[in-house]
Amino acid sequence: NAGVMQNPRHLVRRRGQEARLRCSPMKGHSHVYWYRQLPEEGLKFMVYLQKENIIDESGMPKERFSAEFPKEGPSILRIQQVVRGDSAAYFCASSPPNLRDTEAFFGQGTRLTVV
Amino acid sequence: QQQVKQSPQSLIVQKGGISIINCAYENTAFDYFPWYQQFPGKGPALLIAIRPDVSEKKEGRFTISFNKSAKQFSLHIMDSQPGDSATYFCAATSGSRLTFGEGTQLTVNP
């Protein structure tokens, strides 16, 4: 059973370009979470999705950021017109529907560098 | 209030010593309290977790102590080893959302 797969592991974008981060959840997991980790900081919640549904996007910046989890394929976190402040590690986690008494499994992360 | 406060920010312990990391929360709706361990360049991995109806949980050298009335919980690492050097995050869940503390960077000196 493969774990949570994120790609790419490292992504370099110039200011103004678009960044697309992909996350394939563990088999059997229907829930995906995206977190952002700035250098030397903790994990900040961004968005929580089910298949074809955004459940909670309260942590997403209002502009330039969007996320989707289509019926088929991986979850995508999209950052348009990237700026230097977007440089961070972006982690995806997946879980069964209820986190109580279970765990969210994290991927290895995508390290985005904006130059 | 979704915040989870964690301390200390960094901790240095000698090999064989006890590492203690503390967390506090406000939201009484939290119903599951996991601790995650993160090594550099890796994603967080679940270390140990506790439910609020239990005051203590021990797994090997790792123990969670939970004080429901004070809304505090802590991680104790007994006989700390250099291989335990990592960043530790406490977290709390309500439904399907994980809220993390700010993290503690633990260094265990040989």
Image: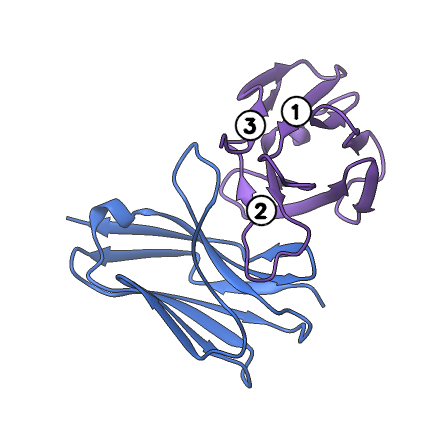
Chain colours: A purple, B blue
Residue A111 visible in rendering: no
Decide: marks 3, 1 in contact (CB < 8 A)? Answer: no
Circles 2 and 3 on the same subunit: yes
> Disc 1 designates what residue?
A22
Residue in the picture at 72% in, 23% down = A73
Residue in the picture at 73% in, 45% down = A48
> Disc 2 designates what residue?
A43
Q: Quadrant of residue A14?
A: top right
Sequence-wise, the earlier of marks 2 and 3 is 3
In the rendered image of this protein, does residue B69 appear above or below residue B17? below
In the rendered image of this protein, does residue A52 appear above or below residue B56? above
Q: Quadrant of residue B12?
A: bottom left
On what subunit does the disc labeled 1 rest? A
**Mark 2–mark 1 distance (CA, rounded to whole Å):** 18 Å
Q: Position of residue A15 (x, y in %)?
A: 71, 17
Kind of element beneath mark 3? strand
Q: Position of residue A91 (x, y in %)?
A: 58, 36
Kind of element beneath mark 1? strand
Residue in the picture at 82% in, 29% down = A64
Sequence-wise, the earlier of marks 2 and 1 is 1
On what subunit does the disc labeled 2 rest? A
